[in-house]
Amino acid sequence: MKNGSNKQYGFHFSQIPFRIPIIDLFAGPGGLGEGFSACCDQDGAPRFRVALSIEKEEYAHRTLELRAFFREFEKGRVPSEYYSYLRGEISREDLVKAFPREGRSASSVAWHAELGHQDLDPRQVDRRIRAATGKAQRWVLIGGPPCQAYSTVGRSRMRGSNPEKFEQDPRHFLYREYLRVIAVHRPPVFVMENVAGILTCRLNGESIFWKILQDLREPGRAFDGHPTIQRLIPKRLKYRVFPLTENTDIPFASKDVMPYIVQAEKYGVPQTRNRVILIGVRSDIEAVPELLCEGEKHVRTWDVIGDLPALRSALSKGEDSTEAWIDAVKSISRSNWINDAKIGPELRAEILSACSSVNGFLPTGGQFMLHSKKPGWMESWYHDEKLKGVCNHSSRQHMRSDLHRYLFVACFGKTFNRSPHLRDFPDELLPKHANASEAVRAGSGLFSDRFRVQLPGIPATTITSHMAKDGHYFIHPDPQQCRSLSVREAARLQTFPDTYFFEGPRTAQYQQVGNAVPPLLALQIAEVVHELITRHESGKSNYNRSRKKPPVKDSLSPKKRNWNITQIQSVVSEFIARLESRGFNDDRLKKELLMTDSLLKKRIRGNMSRNRSVVDELNALLWSRGFFAADRGKSSL
């Protein structure tokens, strides 16, 4: 198909007018956008379209642009040239030459720009957003600021080495770029995602999360003193910010923030991934989002990656050949550590069996591999027959000493159905650095599981961008492959379809996959958002609460209450103590908060004007403890 002629493929698919535009900020490789793009009606027609995605990283942007090109075509009518490019048979330039119109459209959708950079004029961002949304009254803003500064490991490293640098890290404030777009463009709905570490992160003694939540509810307040922005913001612009779960059992989080944490493994994602996800709804929209529906069971790692071609690792620091690799693995049976007292007879037998049966003729993989086997789980989601194989599936190089460690860890997992801690390692296999020695002495700690096998019978651990540095946390469960996970295996665990090609060198590919939102989770969020918009347009709200609701006094009558006043007073007292620990000293408001029965009425009516953010925070705490469950439709969160 040449010269951009796409008669065979029907209409220009990206221009379907009824699809809801999506603006994706800090898009990464596009996991959130992929989920929204996959949200379809019963006839298979997409409900959303990514109208603009903004990303600063070069290779992630190239990945976004390629996927935008893919979406220019109707499902099932993607041209053969696209698959030829993924197989390495033609160049990207040749692909775009064959379909120049689609190429230009993809380039306009995926914008390589750094939000918040001094060289990027915010007015340019505003023009691009207005051009992308057009005259659409319904559109959705999605995305999340870069999250490395909020992650638990990132905080411990930065605070330990340079506390002042941590406090001044500009990534703390990139959410303001997201906030500015909300304030200026007033999307009916927004979805914001970030790492769970943001819930416990403090900056200059103040909780970052509650500050962000307060700003999101009243975006204009964050820009007091900025007249250029203020004149663009309606004075009464407000949002209600909702969680998507009813979590009450997350060990690392306090009960008031648990509902904001989405545990991806509960929603069909084959990895244990905790993320904060907020849905903001403009105050003039009465409908509220439904909760995500948990799956019946967790998805196992092997069900998702078990069909992919087996690979051997490559050798670093020396010759890499089939013979050298076989010798490196089989030398394990002659090593001293195999007789260490920590290795019992069952584990030793498993290690020796793996060494004797190792297959040195396995390939090391590549950017594309021919392969006909289909996934054992969600075939229609992952598999595309036209591809005729898999992309981004190559093993990385490992030192001989790491091959010993990897085989030990994989055999340990196979024998004991858990990943070993460093204290379980034979002394000869222990890494020679201070963190490892400390972890062994303590028996636990941040790096006690520095080498971690992904167990086949349960969801994987969190796929992170750390994979770009080494694969020690992501060891393949098959001892005979003796390697860490490939980019494609990590992408499978992140639920990216096999046609989703990651551009750039392998390090950049790992970075992209680790930073992404799982598209399958994003799809479920998209369905919640679409249902919310549909209810609003039809004049309906949740829980059968229409405009003709019962009088407030009836809903508060003693016979109908589903809470205990004494219990609520206890929670309120706890909340006030928490405020005082944060330096809050508004005695009048504290007195009002303790007038519990009055507070309940004002909560239902939503008309308490004094320090709205504090009241909203209390509402969130009460709701997370199980109060007002029957009345979530009028929550002021």
Image (cartoon, rainbow, N blue to C red):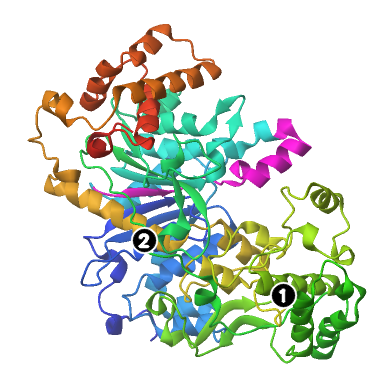
In the displayed structure, 18 sits above or below 596; it is: below
Residue 535 x %, y %: 18, 49
Q: Are marks 2 and 1 in contact (CB under 8 Å)?
A: no
Q: Is mark 1 on a helix, strand or loop?
A: helix
Q: Which of 264 and 487 is in front in this view?
A: 264
Residue 121 x %, y %: 49, 40
Residue at image position (46%, 22%) is: 574
**What range is drawn magenta here?**
138-165
Q: What residue type is labelled 1?
A: Cys
Q: In which quarter of the image is the N terminus?
A: bottom left
> On the rendered structure, is 186 left or right of 467?
left
In the displayed structure, 497 sits above or below 212; it is: below
Residue at image position (28%, 46%) is: 289
In the displayed structure, 225 sits above or below 543; it is: above
In the displayed structure, 493 sits above or below 622; it is: below
Tell which circle, 2 or 1, labels the residue nearer the N-terminal end: 1
Residue 547 x %, y %: 10, 36
> On the rendered structure, is 250 left or right of 128?
right
> On the rendered structure, is 5 left or right of 364?
left
Q: Name the residue carrying label 2.
A: 523
